[in-house]
Structures are given as structure tokens and as C-alpha cells.
């Protein structure tokens, strides 16, 4: 993974990303339903992590629905934008492979379209870290693009960037999660909504054993 390229790229687009996508969940009913299902099964009072939170709009949605939420992102630019927009969310700058969180700190976690920036060899480490920071029986909700290709962007909304988007095989991700100590309880796929890039989307809901 080109960590420095990903960090710089998201720093570059942070303000525009937040402006364009701050209300995207309003047009994603399945995503909202899955987030609500996760919250319903989270231990009362336990913090919920948004791993790869970007500017924090998903973390803010979770906070609006009663969760004490911590957003973690590789990009300090995203963390800064999120902190200015969503004061009810705690933001931390950090890497999915080495999360800035204690063992068992969170009752649940979400990682929506963030593992797509990890190199294949880093996925196991990221899932082991997610397992570490979750309480026993804590839930992890993942989403990603389905496939085997890698799409590279060197321009994004008129900004120069250097970032790869890895499409992933759901069966392989299930295997990696199980190896890391999770039980996958639900697996869903959907077509893109009209406002999204035209890719097939996968969702996995996994529980820490």
C-alpha cells in the first residue's frame, strides 16, 4: 500500500469530499439499515469506532443515533475537517494496521470503503487490529467494492492525487475475517445507487468471537 500517497491524496480532497458527501447516507437506505442493526446489537454505553472515517459523516450519523463514536483516519486533513464539522465525534489520526485504541475499547466498529486502500498483504493485520480493539462479541461492519481489479486515480475532482482502490472478493474477505477470530453473521451485496460510481458493493457483518 502507498500509505503516503493515500494520506496526501485524502488530505488534498478533504474539504471537497466533506462538502460533496456529508449527506450521502440520506440516499443509502441499506447502509442506514445495517448501521442501525449494528447499533441495536452494541452493548449500551460502549463506544463505536468508525475505521477509515474520512470527514466523519458516518460517525456523525452514529452519534446522532445515540452512539459514543470515535472516528479514526489515516489523513490528518480528514480528521481536521471532521473535527470542525462534528464536535460530538472524537477523532483520532491513525492507521488501520496499528489502531490508536486500547484493547477491547469499542463495543462495535464500522469500516465502510476503507479496507479498499490496503494492500492485500495488509488486510490480515487490519482485521487482527479490529479484533484487538473490539470487546468480546463486538460487531464489525465492512463494505467494499466487489471484484479483482485495482483502479488508480491521479486526478480527483480537479485535484492531483495518487491513490489506488482495490476491489475485493467477498469469499476471501470472509476467510481472512474468520482467521482473525471473527464469525461472519451476514453477507449482502447490492448494485450501486444512482448517485454512486457503478460498482457492485458488498457488506459483511462479523462478530468478534
Image: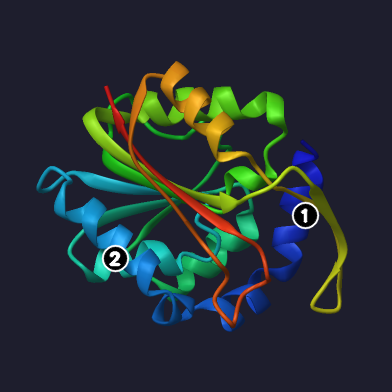
Residue appearing at x 39%, y 71% in the figure: 86
**Label 1: how many Cα within 10 Å (few below 14, some 14–19, many 20+):** some
Is 65 displayed left or right of 116 in the figure?
Answer: left
Q: Residue 174: x and y, percent?
A: 48, 31
Give residue 11's position: percent from left, percent from top. Answer: 71, 61
Q: Is residue 88 visible?
A: no
Which tag is nearer the camera, tag 2 or tag 1?
Answer: 2
Q: Is 2 on the left-hand or right-hand side of 42? A: right
Q: Where is residue 189 in the image (x, y as percent from the top left)?
A: 48, 55
Residue 115 is left or right of residue 68, and the answer is right
- Examine the image and state in which quarter residue 39 appears: bottom left
**In contact (CB < 8 Å): disc 2 and disc 1:** no
According to the image, what is the colour scheme of the structure?
Answer: rainbow
Quadrant occupied by the N terminus: top right
Residue drawn where x is 31% and y is 59% of the image:
35
Q: What element carries label 1?
A: helix
From the image, tell me which residue sits under label 2.
33
Q: Is residue 87 left or right of residue 21?
A: left
Residue in the image at 39% along x and 33% along y: 101
Residue with the mark numbered 1: 8
* Nearest to N terminus: mark 2 or mark 1: 1
Looking at this view, is 96 or 192 the one in front?
Answer: 192
Amino acid at each position: 500500500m502507498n500509505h503516503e500517497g493515500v494520506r496526501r491524496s485524502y488530505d488534498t480532497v478533504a474539504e471537497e469530499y466533506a462538502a460533496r458527501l456529508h449527506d450521502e447516507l440520506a440516499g443509502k437506505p441499506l447502509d442506514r439499515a445495517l448501521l442501525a442493526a449494528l447499533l441495536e446489537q452494541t452493548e449500551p454505553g460502549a463506544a463505536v469506532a468508525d475505521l477509515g472515517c474520512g470527514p466523519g459523516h458516518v460517525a456523525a450519523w452514529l452519534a446522532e443515533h445515540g452512539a459514543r463514536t470515535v472516528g479514526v483516519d489515516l489523513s490528518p486533513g480528514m480528521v481536521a475537517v471532521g473535527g470542525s464539522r462534528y464536535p460530538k465525534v472524537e477523532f483520532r489520526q491513525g492507521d488501520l494496521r496499528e489502531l490508536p485504541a486500547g484493547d477491547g475499547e469499542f463495543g462495535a466498529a464500522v469500516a465502510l470503503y476503507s479496507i479498499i486502500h490496503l494492500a492485500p498483504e495488509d488486510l490480515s493485520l487490519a482485521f487482527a487490529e479490529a479484533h484487538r480493539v473490539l470487546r468480546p462479541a463486538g460487531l464489525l461492519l465492512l463494505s467494499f467494492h466487489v471484484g479483482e481489479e485495482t483502479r488508480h486515480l491521479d486526478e480527483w475532482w480537479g485535484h492531483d492525487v495518487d491513490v489506488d482502490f482495490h476491489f475485493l472478493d467477498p469469499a476471501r474477505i470472509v476467510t481472512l475475517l474468520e482467521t482473525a477470530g471473527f464469525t461472519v453473521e451476514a453477507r449482502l451485496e447490492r448494485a450501486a445507487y444512482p448517485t454512486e460510481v457503478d460498482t457492485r458493493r458488498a457488506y459483511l457483518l462479523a462478530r468478534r468471537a
